[in-house]
Image (spheres, rainbow, N blue to C red):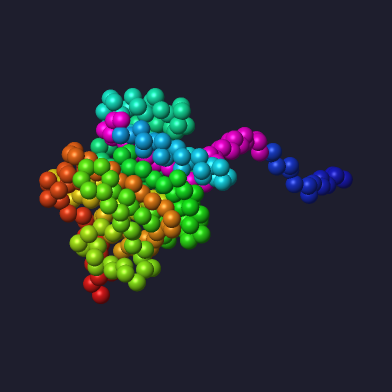
Amino acid sequence: MARKTVKSTKKPRAKAKPKTKRAPAKKLAPRLDITLVVNAHAEGAILIPTLKSARMAVAKARSAGLSVEFLLVADNPNSETLEICKLMAPEMDFEIKKISVKDLGLARNAGLGFAKGEIVAFMDGDDLMSENWLLQGFRVAKDLGPGVVLHPEMNYLFGNGPTYIYLHRDMDSPSFNQKVLVLQNYWTALTIGHRETYAKYPYEPNTMKDGWGYEDWGWNILTISEGIKHKTVPNTAHYIRKKKSGSLLDTTLANNCLPRLYPLQKTLVQ
């Protein structure tokens, strides 16, 4: 009698999959509290007091416990300006980022790309700031969030011509009138805000051959049209040096340029 063969009910063991090596996790750069970006081009020796002013503000913010990054973005700098940057960098504890976009608005955008701070402050290479600007601006920015751009309360203009003081308007002030932006710029270019705000609304270039200038005025108009509120930080100041000649303002006026006003139609034409 033939034997019956019994089939095994056990399933064959699946072949073990070869272990794949996991790629090492990328180390993320630590996010700092605030980055100060000083934009330089051809200031020469005028840059020295600017850097000293910035260093004082950085030191005050650090003494209050903030982690502060100090960057100098040198856009197509002349030899004198670049040499001063290199000489002062070790003493002032800032990092030089050399670029060649040949435009102040685009240079600010480039500075943002280098910045590691949650909050970012911009300063032009021929101006000065009050010692408390970074610290107080950081505190107000953290409190109010990314829907706000901050300006110093007071402006002190000095140098060529008469010296005078004026106050920046806060958008929550009853004296603020948005229609005035068609005729004049309410604020200077010294600002503090969240990096995401600057990233969402980059500066436009000054294309003077096409008649467009005043990149900071245009940026103020753009951000307001998108719902960003511009406010002032109490008891802070911006010191603006007026040059005899060769300023960006002189060039802008000579080319009969206008700011980009068209974003205002969103809010003024109802």
Image quadrant in which the C terminus is located: bottom left
Q: Is residue 198 visible in this depiction of the protein?
A: no
Task: Answer whether residue 267 is magenta in the image.
Answer: no
**Residue 226 position within the rendered picture, expressed as x and y whole percent measured from the top left:** 34, 63
Q: Quadrant of residue 62?
A: top right
Viewer-closest of 156 and 193 = 156
- Residue visible at 75% across and 46% down? 11
- Residue visible at 43% across and 55% down? 235
Viewer-closest of 24 and 178 = 178
Viewer-closest of 91 and 36 = 91
- Residue visible at 18% across and 50% down? 212
Give the side of residue 65 with respect to residue 219, left or right: right
Q: Is residue 172 visible in this depiction of the protein?
A: yes
Against 179, residue 216 (above or below) is above
**Residue 141 position within the rendered picture, expressed as x and y whole percent measured from the top left:** 47, 56
Against 16, residue 195 (above or below) is below
Task: Answer whether residue 33 is magenta in the image.
Answer: yes
Give the side of residue 210 with respect to residue 9, left or right: left
Against 150, residue 255 (above or below) is above
Q: Main secondary structure of the magenta part?
A: loop
Against 96, residue 54 (above or below) is below
Viewer-closest of 200 and 159 = 159
Give the side of residue 73 with respect to residue 26, left or right: left
**Residue 260 position within the rendered picture, expressed as x and y whole percent measured from the top left:** 22, 56
Find the magenta span and give its range: 17-45
